[in-house]
Image (tube, grey):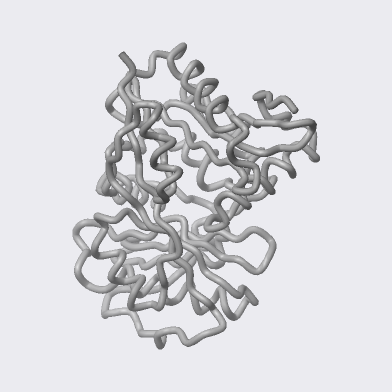
Amino acid sequence: MTVIVRDLRIEDPGDVGRFVHCRHLALPHMLWNGDAVRHHLTHTHPDAHYRCLVAEEDGETIGTAQTGLAYDSPEPGQGYLNIYVRPDRSGRGAGGLLVRTAEEHLAARGATRLFSWVLDEPGHRAFAGRRGYRPSRSAHFLRLDLGGPLPALQDPPPGVELRTAADFADDPRPLFLLDAEVTADEPSDVQAELTDYEGWLSETWRHPLLDPGLTSVAVAGGRPVAFSLAHTDGTTRYATAMTGTARAFRGRGLARLVKTHSLHRARAAGYEEALTGNDSDNAPMLAINRRLGYEIRATEVRHVREPG
């Protein structure tokens, strides 16, 4: 049996479905469906040179990779490759072939530093280490059972009102400005700067998993000052893609306020579990999620390699 690596055939629903299934088996802690796969391939900024790769053995998808350049970083030459192999198909060479193909793709586009998220398990970390990657920061996947108790809803403080992203359908630019401020302060070893409003509209605002009605927004002085961005995938799972507060309004409990309201609305809409992720250095958000009842289900460690 021979393993080959090729690009995902986006025009083939079956190929996309197998990609999603394989990735879910390897990483069940994130929302991901065929619409999201197609959206990323067609709407990610061209400067990212984004690709989805498939490792295939006798017609069966046994591994996947997503790779590209961090085009929105102020530091050029930073690339990423995230490799996931089905746990029941490991040891067949798929991971190594995916890494080699992704590295060649990034090298051809001038990448000088490569980043990869690796599950915090001995076998995965050893795999990365053998290929010259060293561990850096970590991040957690968290889950909350929406069938259990949730913190009571709280009224917003004076001068603050709660809305949803649906209220900004005609002009989402204020949400873009808030997202840009929050993203700039996110703990990361690859800094990002959101400066392209049209790109944000394409990649974030029009993302097929975005649920505007479940995305809570705190407004003060006529502008958004905190938000909790909600994703849903048409099943019973809901996820928080980003929660943050404008710098001038931090320390007032607004992040917890908007997330609590979003969780209550998600449960009322029939969703049964809530997913999210946090950088290990994001102590304020981890504390909020613990108080909301989230539990850590898995951890990834970001690894870095500097070719040459």
- The residue sitting at 27% across, 25% down in the picture is 75
Is the N terminus in the top left, top right, bottom left or bottom right quadrant? top right
Q: Residue at x 49, y 57 (%)?
A: 168
Q: Nearer the viewer, residue 112 or 94?
A: 94
Tell me where residue 84 sits by quadrant. top right
How many labels, in total? 0
From the viewer's perspective, tell me whether residue 7 is left or right of residue 131. Answer: right
Location of residue 155 by image quarter: bottom left
Query: Looking at this view, is 194 or 86 the one in front?
Result: 86
170 or 46, nearer to the observer: 46
For the point 39% across and 30% down, the residue is: 130
Q: Is residue 208 visible?
A: no
Q: Indicate the position of residue 141 as horizontal and vertical percent values.
A: 43, 59
* Residue for point 65% across, 42% down: 89
| Closest to the observer, 127 or 160 | 127
Q: Position of residue 92 (x, y in %)?
A: 62, 33
